[in-house]
């Protein structure tokens, strides 16, 4: 606008008062602190008991366990063809410590792919168990005989499971249950005679299987731990048994993981634009929030120490009808004593609510820090958006017993590190470079440990998109 030019309004009339745009130049606005949509409730970080770890490593000592835990088998799908990754055959108890990759590749090549429709019987109770089944896709029920002669569901198997592995060590093994397909299933079958043929011309495999068959049966408790010999209910002067408690020779050690970033702030911004809000403080605040979000994500999903990856196979259960029903939640709670909390994706909590509504049930709620948290059987169900939801709209629900005193799940951190602003979280000044940019190293150290296997359980493959 040139000097002397008259200011006019949108209607073409001369402006009679100071405009708002010009007035804002002199006004002090009321403004919010910088907002961030990524921030979540982070209930896992808030509810997990944190143990201070000196030296950056936490060792979990346990009683010696003879039972070999089962693992999940991973497959590769090419079109309609499904193949097992050879190294994944080591998840079978009979091949757990076997390391000859060429022999494993040969065994994987001998697996036969079979398709079963819903309702088909895969294996029948009482028949000879001469094959190992590797479940690539689908759901299978283990059917046994109930106390009154009717069928009873002993368990549900899903993708990655295997059954019948006793056939590799015992030629006279029989099926102790009936395996029936609940959905369409893709299964790889490894016959025992195929394994024997490979073993006949492979010394290492033959010796490996013979060594396993020659191991004497150990006296264990129901958890697979070496039994402690005791005497009870006796009278007179019988010989009292001698015993000792053996420990694992190679206990697991958890090293603290790290999440880091370098925050950069120009000195001119830090010097001139600190009113009414300190720019450095706001930048650090939002960076720390993002770091904590990543920390919780790692505690759930990290392959080394994350909760989903470290749950034992026998503590993973499948929903009987796909959806998270009250029966499935009861089954999840029954696998451990003193469950402290459940973690579920918000969409899974919504699915739980729909199933309760169908049965006319109203879950109780409790007040936690001013938040109303739903419960099941008195156990709070905390939302956690770090639990993944698959493209097929399935997710998992985590159950935990927490605390060192309860032999539960614990968080690991190391307090007292240099330049600490919170326990195990530090902001370290790194200097100013030639471009006048100030740098800060923001670091968080953390991990999680499962003290005994039954402290952590997972309800897997929960459907959250069924509305009928």
Image (cartoon, rainbow, N blue to C red):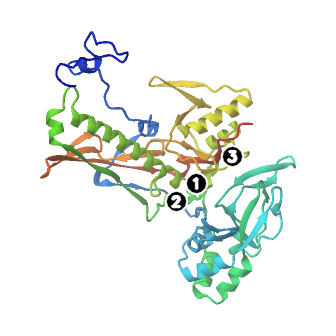
The quarter of the rendered structure image containing the C terminus is top right
Between 343 and 192, the residue placed more toward the observer is 343
In the image, which is nearer the foreground, mark 3 or mark 1? 3
Against 200, residue 377 (above or below) is above
Q: Residue at x 55, y 40 (%)?
A: 345
Mark 2 lies on a secondary structure that is loop
In the image, which is nearer the foreground, mark 2 or mark 3? 3
Which sits earlier in the primary sequence, circle 3 or circle 1?
1
Q: Residue at x 63, y 70 (%)?
A: 84
* Residue under pointer 3: 319
Between 152 and 179, the residue placed more toward the observer is 179
Asked whether residue 7 appears in the rendered view, the answer is yes
Mark 3 crowd level (few <14, some 14–19, many ≥20, 10 Å Cα): many
Which sits earlier in the primary sequence, circle 2 or circle 1?
1
Is 178 left, or right, of 170 in this rendering? Answer: right
Mark pair 2, 3: CA separation: 42 Å
Q: Position of residue 98 (x, y in %)?
A: 55, 76
Q: Residue at x 45, y 39 (%)?
A: 44
Mark 3 lies on a secondary structure that is loop
* Residue under pointer 2: 243
* Residue under pointer 1: 230
The quarter of the rendered structure image containing the N terminus is top left
**Callout count:** 3
Q: Quadrant of residue 208?
A: bottom right
């Amino acid at each position: 606008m040139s000097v002397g030019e008259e200011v006019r309004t949108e209607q073409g009339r001369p402006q009679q008062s100071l405009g708002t745009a010009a007035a804002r130049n002199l006004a002090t606005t009321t403004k919010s602190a910088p907002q961030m949509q990524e921030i979540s409730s982070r209930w896992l970080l808030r509810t997990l008991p944190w143990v201070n770890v000196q030296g950056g490593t936490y060792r979990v000592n346990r009683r010696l366990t003879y039972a070999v835990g089962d693992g999940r088998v991973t497959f590769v799908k090419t079109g309609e063809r499904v193949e097992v990754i050879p190294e994944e055959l080591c998840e079978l108890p009979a091949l757990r410590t076997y390391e000859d990759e060429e022999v494993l590749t040969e065994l994987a090549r001998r697996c036969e792919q079979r398709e079963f429709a819903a309702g088909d019987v895969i294996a029948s109770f009482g028949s000879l168990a001469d094959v190992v089944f590797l479940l690539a896709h689908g759901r299978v029920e283990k059917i046994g005989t109930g106390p009154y002669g009717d069928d009873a569901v002993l368990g549900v198997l899903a993708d990655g499971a295997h059954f019948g592995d006793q056939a590799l060590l015992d030629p006279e093994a029989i099926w102790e249950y009936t395996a029936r397909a609940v959905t369409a299933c893709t299964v790889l079958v490894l016959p025992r005679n195929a394994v024997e043929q490979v073993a006949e011309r492979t010394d290492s495999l033959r010796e490996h299987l013979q060594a396993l068959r020659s191991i004497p049966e150990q006296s264990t408790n129901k958890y697979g731990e070496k039994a402690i010999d005791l005497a009870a209910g006796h009278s007179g002067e019988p010989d009292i048994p001698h015993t000792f408690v053996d420990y694992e020779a190679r206990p697991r050690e958890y090293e603290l993981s790290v999440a880091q970033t370098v925050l950069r702030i120009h000195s001119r911004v830090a010097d001139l634009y600190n009113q009414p809000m300190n720019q450095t403080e706001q930048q650090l605040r939002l960076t720390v929030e993002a770091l904590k979000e990543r920390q919780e994500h790692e505690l759930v999903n990290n392959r080394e120490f994350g909760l989903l990856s470290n749950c034992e196979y026998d503590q993973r259960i499948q929903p009987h009808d796909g959806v998270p029903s009250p029966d499935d939640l009861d089954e999840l709670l029954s696998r451990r004593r003193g469950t402290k909390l459940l973690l579920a994706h918000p969409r899974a909590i919504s699915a739980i609510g729909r199933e309760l509504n169908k049965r006319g049930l109203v879950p109780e709620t409790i007040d936690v820090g001013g938040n109303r948290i739903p419960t099941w059987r008195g156990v709070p169900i905390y939302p956690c958006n770090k639990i993944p939801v698959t493209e097929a709209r399935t997710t998992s629900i985590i159950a935990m017993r927490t605390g060192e005193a309860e032999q539960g799940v614990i968080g690991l951190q190391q307090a007292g590190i240099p330049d600490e602003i919170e326990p195990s979280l530090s902001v370290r000044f790194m200097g100013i470079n030639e471009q006048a940019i100030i740098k800060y190293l923001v670091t968080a150290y953390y991990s999680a440990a499962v003290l005994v296997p039954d402290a952590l359980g997972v309800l897997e493959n929960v459907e959250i998109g069924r509305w009928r």
